Amino acid sequence: MKKSSLYAFFALVATALLLWTAWNSMRPTPDHAEKTITVIVDAGEGRSSTFTIVTEEPFLRGALEQIDLIAGDESMYGLFVTTVDGIAAQADLDQWWMFTKDGGQELPTGVSDTPIEDGASYEITLKTGW
């Protein structure tokens, strides 16, 4: 192996390590204390429900599964939600569930990795089209 190839390899490894360290230090950390959140489900066509959840779960997924509100398919990125409050998104109609917080703020993480905050409001909206 040439010396320059070896240096390039070590530079690549060092860069990957730095990126991983930066990502890990900025990632949200969960809070295991008791929290009360509000979840609003908007399935369209006048179908709307509001839930108040008291939980010690650190992430949104755990709180929603605590009351059997969501179901879906596991992926390498966490749970891909396909059903909310018994209503399944229809893939043939390009339907999907969008998760927002406090009146429409998009979440930077998926439902499995979204830390919940006491007093926050989360909205789950059935969308059609990409």
Image (cartoon, grey):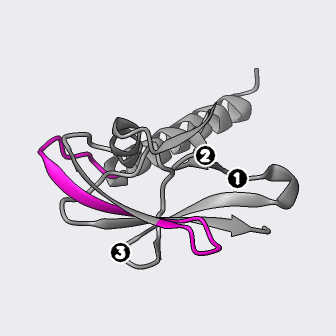
Where does label 2 land, which residue? 83
Q: Label 1 to label 3, Cα distance in Å?
A: 23 Å
User: In the image as oriented, which residue stretches furthest toward the top?
Assistant: 1
Q: Secondary structure at mark 1?
A: loop
Q: Secondary structure at mark 3?
A: loop
Residue nearest the viewer, comparing 119 with 14: 119
**Amino acid under label 2?**
Thr
Whether the magenta-drawn stretch holds residue 55 is answered as no
From the image, state whether disc 1 or disc 3 is nearer to you.
Answer: 1
**Amino acid under label 1?**
Ala
Where does label 3 land, which residue? 102
Per the rendering, the mark at residue 101 is none
Residue nearest the viewer, comparing 60 with 64: 64
Give the quarter of the figure containing the N terminus.
top right
**Amino acid under label 3?**
Asp
Where does label 1 land, which residue? 89
User: In the image as oriented, which residue stretches furthest toward the right?
Assistant: 92
Q: Label 2 to label 3, Cα distance in Å?
A: 21 Å
Please report whichever mark, 2 or 1, sits nearer to the chain's N-terminal start: 2
- The reply, left or right, for residue 84 in relation to residue 25 is right
Disc 1, disc 3: CB below 8 Å?
Answer: no
Q: Residue 130, position in %: x, y?
A: 78, 67
- The segment highlighted magenta reads 28-48
Q: Residue 56, position in %: x, y?
A: 19, 40
Q: Residue 124, position in %: x, y?
A: 50, 62
Please report whichever mark, 2 or 3, sits nearer to the chain's N-terminal start: 2
Whether the magenta-drawn stretch holds residue 35 is answered as yes
